[in-house]
Image (cartoon, rainbow, N blue to C red):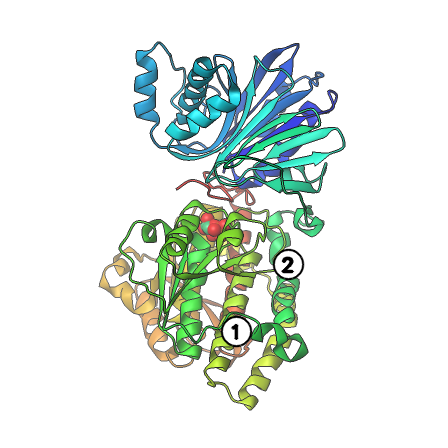
Amino acid sequence: MCGIVGYLGNKEKTISVLIEGLKTLEYRGYDSAGIAYQKENKIKIIKSVGRLQNLEQKINLEDSILGIGHTRWATHGKPSTTNSHPHQVGSITLVHNGIIENYIELKQSLEKIGYHFQTETDTEVATAYIDYCYKQTKDMIKALKKAKEKLKGSYAFGIINSDEPNTLYAMKKESPLILGRSKDELFLASDPMAISSHTKEICYLKEGSIAKLEKNKITLIEDKETTPTWVTLDIEQTKCNKNGYEHYMLKEIHEQPDVIYNTIMPYLENNLENLHKMPHFSKYQKIQIVACGSAYHTGLVGKWMLETYANIPVEVEIASEYRYKKVFYDKKTLVIVVSQSGETADTLASLRKANKDGIDTLAIVNVITSTIAREAKYVLPVKAGIEIAVATTKAYLAQLALFSLITLKLALEKNQVNEEELEELLVHYQKLPIKIKKMLKELNLKELASKVYKNEDIFFLGRGIDYAICTEASLKLKEISYIHSESYAAGELKHGTISLINKKTPVLSLVTDKYITEKTISNIKEVKARGAYSIVIITQQLDEEADYYDDKIVIPNTHFLLQPILNIIPFQLLAYEIAKLRGCDIDKPKNLAKSVTVE
Ligand code: F6R
């Protein structure tokens, strides 16, 4: 989703800092980009649609002391050079992440007093409104305060006022924005990654803050003028390279053994010392898990783990629905939000809703410095490291591992696990990273991918926990290969969707739960009888020679609580191989964004 970089400092560096910063934000997804910089007290703007290379081709490395840059993921108005940022109205040039909700009303009132608009965007209206406020007040801080009162929605702004050379402004509400500093240089960014090669010293702007950046001077206004709080960025969180892999997604899939080790081991060492330090879960009578996309799919697995192993009712909710619906919770409810980025707008709004109602909240997040991590009552970090590929793999897997640990903690609190069972489970935990490593080494799905990659529809079937994994398997495939795919609870298919099964339609069925194996197999036979190309993904223990599949993938067994963690891996790899055969842009699928900061 949109990205912002701003710089004030060395005149020889400005343009390269902006371009380099925008490149690090590419993974978030964008469809156009632009920069604005100060040149002899004028503001020069260069914009382009498409990839950053297109923008770079238009840019000369001129000297400039300050500038702002932006990658745009279209929300209001199509991707085009005109609609891309920076926008300029009067003396104001601005980049924006977020959505101005009342832009139509503002646009109409600004038009009445003589403003004309060139674009279809909400951002141009915000730019005009700030220009209007500035004309009224003749003071930029006053103007921004006035605009803050009027603008509804979410925004992170990087702003230049051509009347005030050598000065950058920033303003933030519900969209991430940070400041950075190093000797004689100041930075602005929507994501620390964008400036991490220049500085590790950053300041997270609070809701509603306004910042004025001048050479070696920052004026920060929260409720009143205040001094910035600087923190040091975790270097590990900013490392990013493909390490010899063709794509980030493949690299991240192969990082999963380490990610699982790093996520679980801190809880298991020293006689489960850190596991016992997790919040006290047995005081809750109900859990609600709220998230979006793959993180929502994690929630479906979390529900199965918690209900099956720890005996507590769990509801899983899509955050964009939860935030606006009537929710039934009370002081005995724990709301768990799950988010890789920790910035997803709907998940954040759901967290805030629960916080506001005084409900206990727990965040499972990968980016520990994110807004969600900062605002939840309890935080359990997953140790996935930075995830660059838009399609999540390692963060999803680490979230599953964390849910298994929460489940174990609750089951232990409720005395539902005897010593022998615990011993057995801990042995399985220890072996998990090695098993994942072995699977990744041995699974070669290129041939299978070559049999199905030309299809335009692929179905995924499973019951219970296998269905929960299929939801993620299906999403993984469609988002990176653009093949239409659906996941179905195996018993549900014959209530309508089976009409879509044609000769050779690939149907991938996951069979790992011994209590419902026979039931799932009956459903597989139903689709096979209708000509489907049946691919079965089955655990070693359940594997048998049979006539209900055309191809199969066998998965090693582990403890039943941990089994889902292994089960998703073949689907990640298969989606990757299929997308590769189809020539897709695997790390940056079309229309998608890594961090969805608008609702
Ligand atoms: C799909 C994917 C998305 C995210 C969703 C939530 O591969 O990554 O569906 O899971 O946008 O994002 P986070 O986890 O950052 O809240």
Mark 1 sits on what residue? 562
Closer to the camera: disc 2 or disc 1? 1
From the viewer's perspective, tell me whether residue 95 is left or right of residue 147. right
Q: State the CA–CA distance, disc 2 to disc 1.
A: 19 Å
Q: Residue at x 40, y 72 (%)?
A: 284
The image position of residue 385, as x and y in percent, is 63, 54
The image position of residue 107, as x and y in percent, is 34, 20
Please name the amino acid that badge 1 sits on.
Leu
- State whether label 2 is within 8 Å of ligand 1: no
Q: Is residue 549 visible?
A: no
Residue 361 or 209: which is nearer the viewer? 209
Could you classify mark 2 by the number of other residues whose Cα lies within 10 Å: few (under 14), some (14-19), or many (20 or more)?
many
Q: Is residue 445 visible?
A: yes
Please name the amino acid that badge 2 sits on.
His
The image position of residue 229, as x and y in percent, is 63, 42
The image position of residue 11, as x and y in percent, is 73, 20
Residue 419 or 496: which is nearer the viewer? 419
Please state, as top left, top right, bottom left or bottom right, where the C terminus lies in the image: top left
From the viewer's perspective, tell me whether residue 312 is left or right of residue 139. left
Considering the numbered disc 2 on the image, is that residue within a helix, a strand or a loop? helix
Could you classify mark 1 by the number of other residues whose Cα lies within 10 Å: few (under 14), some (14-19), or many (20 or more)?
many
Q: Residue at x 62, y 50 (%)?
A: 386
From the viewer's perspective, tell me whether residue 323 is left or right of residue 185. left
Identify the disc placed on residue 254: 2
Identify the disc placed on residue 238: none
From the viewer's perspective, tell me whether residue 214 is left or right of residue 151. right
Q: Residue at x 51, y 65 (%)?
A: 400
Q: Earlier in the sequence, mark 2 or mark 1?
A: 2
Q: 250 above or below 67?
A: below
Q: 15 above or below 406?
A: above
Outermost residue, front direction? 224
Residue 16 position by quadrant: top right
